[in-house]
Image (cartoon, rainbow, N blue to C red):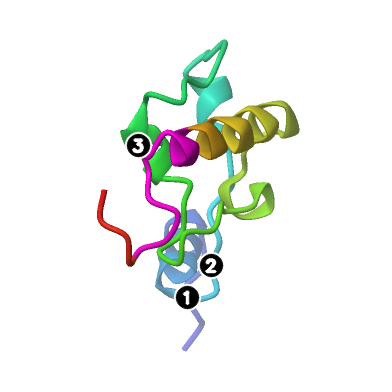
Amino acid sequence: MPRPTGKKFDKRRQQQNPLFKRKKFCRFTAADVEYIDYKDIETLKDFIGENGKITPARLTGTKAHYQRQLDTAIKRARFLALVPYTDQHKA
């Protein structure tokens, strides 16, 4: 019996594969963001890992221009105690 083939089958097989990676895209480019604000805590929290580290651009798909802005915004928010340095600190 022949194996099933086609676009639909390939797409389903890729989604079931635990090693399947989605194409990364820059959220800030898609939203046409001009400047990343340090006061936008909800956006910043998406880019901070559970251990408190800033998630690298190779994992998030963020472009270098926005990654630098994001880095500065997170550090400012930490300094002003808007975002905790680690997960153990409650903000």
Horizontal and vertical percent position of residue 76: 52, 32
Mark 1 secondary-structure assignment: loop
Is the Cβ of the residue at disc 2 closer than 8 Å to that at disc 3?
no
Image position of 33 with respect to 28: above or below: above
Looking at this view, name the residue that lies furthest to the front. Answer: 80
Horizontal and vertical percent position of residue 10: 50, 64
Q: Which residues are magenta?
A: 77-87
**Mark 1: few, some, or many residues within 10 Å (few <14, many ≥20)?**
few
Q: CA distance from mark 2 to mark 1?
A: 5 Å
Q: Which of these two is toward me, 74 or 23?
A: 74
**Mark 3: few, some, or many residues within 10 Å (few <14, many ≥20)?**
some
Mark linked to residue 20: 2
Horizontal and vertical percent position of residue 73: 54, 30
Query: Residue at the location (69% across, 32% down)?
Result: 68
Image position of 83 with respect to 15: above or below: above
Mark 2 secondary-structure assignment: loop
Query: Residue at the location (62% across, 43% down)?
Result: 61
Q: CA distance from mark 3 to mark 1?
A: 38 Å
